[in-house]
Image: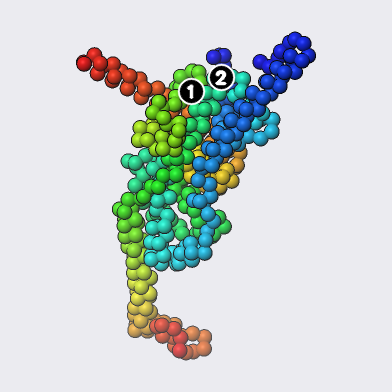
Amino acid sequence: MTPVDERERWEVLELIGACVANELEGERAREAERLIFENPDYRRVAESYSRMLVMLSALGAEEVEAPEEIVSYVVRRAYYSAFLRQAETFLGALGRSYLDAFVYYLGLRPRDVSGRESYGGGRI
Amino acid sequence: MCDSRGPVGVTQKLEQACLGALGSVIVLSYGIVGWVSDLRPRGERTSSVNAGDRILVARASRGDVEAFTKLVRANSSLVYRVALRMLGPEDAQDASQEVWVRVWRNIGGFKGESAFSTWLYRITMNTCLSARERESRRTAREYAEGMPYLLAEPSGGEADPEAAALDAERREEIEAALKYVRTEHRAALVLRHMEGLSYAEIAEVLEVPDGTAKGWVSRGRATMLLALAEENDKRRERRRSGGTAGEAVG
């Protein structure tokens, strides 16, 4: 095989790969086809690429089922987090109402401008 | 190669012969290319958000766990499959769980500007890339000089390449070789050649320009071929030495 430096080797490898994957157009495509046609080594590289792409594609097309533990774990976490969120909202509202009532009980709520007293849970 | 000297008639005939040979090589390579492209599962996994998904996402973002459960059930195989390709079976389950926890936490921020699957691919890839951050600092593998070749299997694999590709030994080779591809390049390679995404979709998932996505796929493909050729050689060598040892014992 003609000795080629490392950079050139990578360039040729990537060019042949792109050609086999049908991603080249115009002059680049013709250049790659010429390389493949003229050099038996490059022709074998192209064949290896097409074999690899077939294998990758076939492996990618295989159906993979996620283990049931993943779904059950995730759903459990979601329910738990939703429960905590609701509990937080409920307890927050309850706490605010109690505080309001306590403030009212102690008579600490200031009268508003109209002179009417405000009560816990809103104005009347 | 096609430079021939001699009488005009002979030269013309030689030129015609050369052109004919070139033509058949091109036709053959296009045949291979077309066949490879046909095998790629284009589009079927990357459909845009359908009405059903949109409703489920909207309900889940309001905290509806039932809707979220339906989304998980419908898309768990996508997440697990990508995690499996990126991390291997040891870490795929933990990563998938982490992905869904992140989805639940951030689903309110999903605006529906891209397909739900694209958003899901992005979270999955980000999770896998964080899990493999250390790997990028790993020293680069030295590859043998010369061109990498994958030798055809003698057991008639060429007749039915898809069936041959599903062979357990080849699957192991691919999975072993994938580990030697740099994480970002592997992500791009998996999305392109195993998930069948377009470069625009890959760029969107990995949040890089189109040109970078193309470069990563190209480099990943070349590294993968080198690693696969080495894996292939190693296995062949092991098989041969195993056979020789067997003969010696016999």
Q: Which amino acid does label 2 sit on?
A: Pro
Identify which residue is drawn at 71% across, 13% down.
B4
In-image side of A31 versus A116 (left or right): right
Element on which disc 1 rests: loop
**Chain letter for the residue marked with disc 2 in the picture:** A
The residue furthest top is B6
Q: The C terminus of chain B lies in which quarter of the figure? A: top left
Q: Dot 1, how many residues are within 10 Å of its Cα: few (below 14), some (14-19), or many (20+)?
A: many
Query: Which residue is at the front of the view, A1 or A10?
Result: A1
Query: How far apart, in angstroms, are the residues tagged by discs 1 and 2?
Result: 13 Å
**Percent x, y for residue B217?**
53, 36
From the image, tell me which residue sits under label 1: B148
**Percent x, y for residue A64?**
38, 47
Query: Which residue is at the front of the view, B243 or B104?
Result: B243
Element on which disc 2 rests: helix
Whether residue A50 appears in this view of the structure is yes
In-image side of B155 versus A38 (left or right): left
Query: Which residue is at the front of the view, B140 or A109?
Result: B140
Mark number displayed over residue A40: 2
In-image side of B112 versus B106 (left or right): right
The residue furthest left is B249
The scheme the figure's colours follow is rainbow
Query: Which residue is at the front of the view, A86 or A46?
Result: A46
Above-or-below relation of B81 to B152: below
Identify which residue is drawn at 52% across, 25% down.
A45
Q: The N terminus of chain B lies in which quarter of the figure? A: top right
